[in-house]
Amino acid sequence: MKEQEARKTYAFAEFQLDTRKRVLLKDGRPLALNSKAFDLLALLVEHGGEVLSKDELLETVWPKQIVEENNLTVQISALRKILGERKDEHRLIVTIPGKGYKFVADIQAPSDQEHASPDEEKEIVIENRTISRVVVEEISEDETPSEKVRSESEGLHRGLKAGSERVNESRAVNISSHPSSFILWSSIGAILLVGLMGLWFWQGTDKAEQRQLKLTKLTTSGKVTSATLTPDGKYAVFAQTEENGESLYLRQIATGSQTRILPPQPVNFIGLTVTPDGNFIYCTTFLKNKADPQLWRVPLLGGATEQIAGVVTGVAVSFSPDAKQIAFTESRSSIKETHLSVAASDGSNKRILIRAPDDLRSFSTFGSNPLAWSPEGNDLACAVEEKSLGGGMKTGILLVNALTGEEKFISERRWDYISHLAWADAENLAFVAYDSDPWQGQVWAISRTTGEARQLTNDLNSYSWLAASASGELLTVQKNTVSHLRVADFDEPAKTLQSREIRNESGHIDNVAWGADGAILYSSSATGKREIWRINADGSSPTQLTVGANITFGLSVSPTDGSLAFCSTNDGKHSLRLADANGKNMRPLIDGTEDVWANFTPDGQSVIFQRGLNNKTLTLWRVAINGGTPIQLTRKPSSHPAVSPDGAQMAYYFMDAESDGEWHIGLISSDTGAIQGKFSFPKFVTERRMRWHPGGRFLTQIFYTGENVNLLLLPTDSSEAVTISGLDKGDVNWFEWARDGKRIVISQTTEIQDVVLLRD
């Protein structure tokens, strides 16, 4: 144990820095600041007026670590942005060329904490330490392996096989939108990952022994969408976003040489598996305007592509060890079931092992590898969602006999979602699990014999796609997310948009809406929890409104009193809640388990919403804000409702399986659900993001040309659609028109996704 020395509170300009509570306040309001930036600011303030060299700063803020000087530059830049310093202003932090940095603002005397009572002043910290040497390697895209970063880290270590102590970093930090910053932050996340992996690897030992582990970064493009590993661990296979679609690549891990297997295809690769003999890749592909995915067989070294008939799955297949069979999941929405099935490797002789009724359980059926055939070939490990005691859906891992379908859970432990599985060896199963607070995929492992689960990563990144070699090397895709809020001015006569960024931050900004006062409301995970925030349209005064909202799918503002309706996710339940305009007085609207995408009607008296998620049949409903029985408006699959400005109609998406099998926009009465028409839209519109323009003359949709974001204006009088550019780049999470129809707010995400390899 050690007693920490007394800490101080400093005041400068409009800020207060409390080093005891580790909080930075601006006019009494807390600001989002990551731990390293806080340490750096505290050090500069404590030595106000002194020039601190870069070496001094690096040695103090990153003790016993070897990090790049650019790391310091990024943190200084982040501090200046948070402190509101404009370019070249430096009223608080000044760069001394060739020497370092100096804090130059007037600092008020520290608070009298030095005179506090002993009980108030002391903090007791219990520390258990072990040294784990780690090496982070990055193989550059020029096919020349090069060691990029070396780090020696100290980590907490005691009883870690239960995953009880982990390294944490604050998730709240505004960062530059420059690509190099994204890559740097990904590298920082990689260092965190390796430090954690050094505490526990496949053996799960809790011995305080010194070991060397390596994380090799195999790609640096930031555009990887899915990946896998050959069984011998010599090659990585990955899909990557390019200008005209997605390409498939093969990379030799030892040399860094890289070959393109397939040129850009107009599809998404939503699952990759290499056959046990290493000769072929089974690619699950999806075209957004088509109902069913396809399974392709592609030679590992390139060649003719063959479609596997008889298998319609949206996930990566898993091979039996003898390569004779494949396992996969299927969605059967028409009968409200998902299936776990097995077939011959050519798609023939399909048989269903398990049928999962939607109201009781569900298998993941899209964009994941939720199955892993055990090394000895007897069992399939499978992620399955089941209804919990609280009514929500929680995910566990089943072991299913591949011959009889007999099943048992590997553990009683449950997560909000599990998306990717891979056997590291005959005993240990690795997987990616999500919890809603926050919604980030982290790598876990579980013992087949004991059911003991251990969390391997706990950092600012999210992880997806897992594959393991015969020697236990683990490949995964590491994702770093930066979100942006943009406001664009709409010139309707000129059909142009002029956009500007008003905020960016690490983590997720998903939902956006305009408040009654003209401010912007948005959901943010900046504090590590998904809450509703308010910000002025010029980007000033971001303020957290809610505590414990856990907002996920959708946010709507009442046109009459500014109250809020949103989806809140707790214990696997997605239910609708209401709150006052200031975020207070949160209360349930309806006690559903899969109710999302709330839309206020113009009179503010009702909310129209979507019931159903994932593999469920999606239908639209209406409920009064004062409670009562909800009214079902649609019977056939329909999603993402949008209420017209006059409240008379509701638009929604549906796939017209009875005619052309294409996606369309349907129109129904908001009161009765009576069908009033449908619209077709161009096939290049692949996103399901739609809002009415406040004038009511057209519906608006998001679409992409390459990485550029565009807007489609779809007139309701069936005249020709108009496309508008000017919304920059990045994946759009949501958008909403201001009430006057002259501005639009957009939440966008830039995701840096690269392949990394973990090994002893």
Image (cartoon, grey):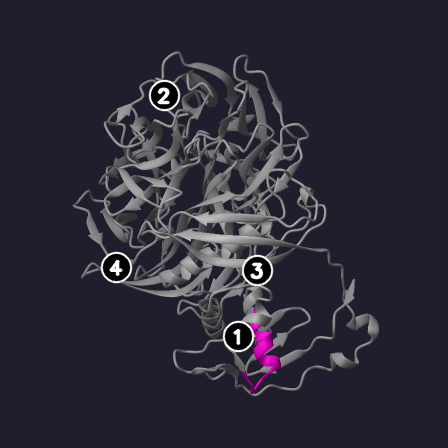
Mark toward the viewer: 4 or 2:
2
Dot 3 and dot 2 residues touching (CB under 8 Å): no
Residue type at numbered disc 1: Asp
Measured as percent of width and height from the top left, residue 340 is found at 48, 21
Residue receiving disc 4: 726
How far, Cα to Cα, is label 3 from label 1? 24 Å
Residue 55's disc is 1
| Mark earlier in primary sequence (3, 1) | 1
- Residue drawn at point x = 58 percent, y = 40 percent: 444
Residue type at numbered disc 2: Val
How far, Cα to Cα, is label 4 from label 1? 43 Å
Residue receiving disc 2: 311
How far, Cα to Cα, is label 4 from label 2? 41 Å
Dot 4 and dot 3 residues touching (CB under 8 Å): no
- What secondary structure is marked by label 1? helix
Measured as percent of width and height from the top left, residue 92 is found at 50, 82
Measured as percent of width and height from the top left, residue 533 is found at 51, 60
| Mark earlier in primary sequence (1, 2) | 1
Magenta stretch: give its range: 38-51
Q: Is residue 471 magenta?
A: no
